[in-house]
């Protein structure tokens, strides 16, 4: 059985020694951030603050802040189990015989159980607040000293396509302006922002309905972070990962659906064309993202469990909790990348590269110029387009070992010959680009160079000891009493 809600996840974390309860008062203004930052940097546990100052609502943070916790969240013993499952579905072929058809049945049944299930009610509606509602009831963090205020940092924001009605769910930070309004920081390239732009352009409606869920089962939270194509429903993908459907319930004030097992739901709307200054905010780049104009979210109704738990996160100088979620995304999406680029052996997004600044790729090189083909193909793949620097190496290089990549890449490149620059979309949070959302990218071909690529010199072999000597010295090492 999949983890049904946030409480199930908390119990699993505690059972596995991955959770620490903090029973004394801690201030959501900066102090909880310092706790969380110190804990993740030193390999500490998830933290459940039972008495946040000025709130009766407990606060959970760092729930995903290690690979072990990511495994518990996704209910696997190894993250690699998920890309293996995805690969098995991608390899489905038309069955040729009765035996082939029977072999497909378990896979088709698994896929069929992924579709979201609509229910009439759920725990998220145990308390319904339409009057005297206020965000001040919840321990919303003021994360860093230079932040413009308090921010909701782990919201599952639901909107729908204005033409098709297709659901989208993304995680966009929300600055609290007052008890009933927040900013809606969806960047230009996000699907929610696209829904908003299209409504503004059509000018048929004055408002855009939005619903925000806070605190769901861990797979549903994680799925909202995934850079899925617009055609894939995040709740469907969550059902696939969970092995059972996500229960969805209709909101009180609009037709949007939210996870029925959520802790807290904020229902409201955006006035089309209404913008307000949002930020600065201490972001995952390790720098403050600058203030800018974003839509305003007006809250009409708040529903929650009788004793809700507020789930949140912080971002800042890496590694943070988002790095571990990003590492899981890296592993899960490798099969999908290989579907488009079969020569790719592995990829790595180091913590210091904060996802979009550095992508390391190993390939099975079969023809001249293939490394450059891979670079440009990746720049054309969804949110991979934001990759500021792509380094391509041969398949014998372990891209998970950054030291090995650095050593071999720097030995393999002639900078003028092997580095190329191009212009294109840049992550909105990149403060160094020449213009917002637009700038240059760099590709580095650090593969072995071939004569067909114009390299006429000899290419040397890597220094290595013979295996026989290594085995013999292994025995002599122990005999010598060395460790």
Image (tube, helix red, strand yellow):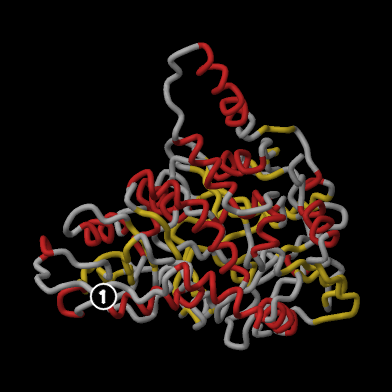
Q: Position of residue 413 (x, y in %)?
A: 24, 76
**Outermost residue, top side:** 98
- Which residue position is annotated with label 1? 412
Q: Residue at x 36, y 54 (%)?
A: 344
Of residue 145 and residue 351, the one placed in the foreground of this image is 351
**Outermost residue, right side:** 23
Picture quadrant of residue 145: bottom right
Quadrant location of the C terminus?
Answer: bottom right
Q: Residue at x 22, y 57 (%)?
A: 370
- Above or below, 266 against 354 in this view is above
**Outermost residue, bottom side:** 145
Which SS class for mark 1? helix
Quadrant location of the N terminus?
Answer: top right
Of residue 107 and residue 255, the one placed in the foreground of this image is 107
How many residues crowd around disc 1 within 10 Å: few (fewer than 14), some, or many (20 or more)?
Answer: some
Q: Position of residue 150 (x, y in %)?
A: 65, 76
Asked whether, in this view, residue 73 is left or right of residue 334, the answer is right
Give the tally of numbered discs.
1
Of residue 126 and residue 298, the one placed in the foreground of this image is 126
Q: Position of residue 322 (x, y in %)?
A: 58, 68
Picture quadrant of residue 371: bottom left
Q: Position of residue 366 (x, y in %)?
A: 23, 52
Asked whether, in this view, residue 348 is left or right of residue 461, the answer is right
- Above or below, 458 against 172 in this view is below
- Above or below, 16 against 480 in this view is above
Asked whether, in this view, residue 256 is left or right of residue 385, the answer is right
Q: Residue at x 39, y 75 (%)?
A: 430
Asked whether, in this view, residue 64 is left or right of residue 380, the answer is right
């Amino acid at each position: 059985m999949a983890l049904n809600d946030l409480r199930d996840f908390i119990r699993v974390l505690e059972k596995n020694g991955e959770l620490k309860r903090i029973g004394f008062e801690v201030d959501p203004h900066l102090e909880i951030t310092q706790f969380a930052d110190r804990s993740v940097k030193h390999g500490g546990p998830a933290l459940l603050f039972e008495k946040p100052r000025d709130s009766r609502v407990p606060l959970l943070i760092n729930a995903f802040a290690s690979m072990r916790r990511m495994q518990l969240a996704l209910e696997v013993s190894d993250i690699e189990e998920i890309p293996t499952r995805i690969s098995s579905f991608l390899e489905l072929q038309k069955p040729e015989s009765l035996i082939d058809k029977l072999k497909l049945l378990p896979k088709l049944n698994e896929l069929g159980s992924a579709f979201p299930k609509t229910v009439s009610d759920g725990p998220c509606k145990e308390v319904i607040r339409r009057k005297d509602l206020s965000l001040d009831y919840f321990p919303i963090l003021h994360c860093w000293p230079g932040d413009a205020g308090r921010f909701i940092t782990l919201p599952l924001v639901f909107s729908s396509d204005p033409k098709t009605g297709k659901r989208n769910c993304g995680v966009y930070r929300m600055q609290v302006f007052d008890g009933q309004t927040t900013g809606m920081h969806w960047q230009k390239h996000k699907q929610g922002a696209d829904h908003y732009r299209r409504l503004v352009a059509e000018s048929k409606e004055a408002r855009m309905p939005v619903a925000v869920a806070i605190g769901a089962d861990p797979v549903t939270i994680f799925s909202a972070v995934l850079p899925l194509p617009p055609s894939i429903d995040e709740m469907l993908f969550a059902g696939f990962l969970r092995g059972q459907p996500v229960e969805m319930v209709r909101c009180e004030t609009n037709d949007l659906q939210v996870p029925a097992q959520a802790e807290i739901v904020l229902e409201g709307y955006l006035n089309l064309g209404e913008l307000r200054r949002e930020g600065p905010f201490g972001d995952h780049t390790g720098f403050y993202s600058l203030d800018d104009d974003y839509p305003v979210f007006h809250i009409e109704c708040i529903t929650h469990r009788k004793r809700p738990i507020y789930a949140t996160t912080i971002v800042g100088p890496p590694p943070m909790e988002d790095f571990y979620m990003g590492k899981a995304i890296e592993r899960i999406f490798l099969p999908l990348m290989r579907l488009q680029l079969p020569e790719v052996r592995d990829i790595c997004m180091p913590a210091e590269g904060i996802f979009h600044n550095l992508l390391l790729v190993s390939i099975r090189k079969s023809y001249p110029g293939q490394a450059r083909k891979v670079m440009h193909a990746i720049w054309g793949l969804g949110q991979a387009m934001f990759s500021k620097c792509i380094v391509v190496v041969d398949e014998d290089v372990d891209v998970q070992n950054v030291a090995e990549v650095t050593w071999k890449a720097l030995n393999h490149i002639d900078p003028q010959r092997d580095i190329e620059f191009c212009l294109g979309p840049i992550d909105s949070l990149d403060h160094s680009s020449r213009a917002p959302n637009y700038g240059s990218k760099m590709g580095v071909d650090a593969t072995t160079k071939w004569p067909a690529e114009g390299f006429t010199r000899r290419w040397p072999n890597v220094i290595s000891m013979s295996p026989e000597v290594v085995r013999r010295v292994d025995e002599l090492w122990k005999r010598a009493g060395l460790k």
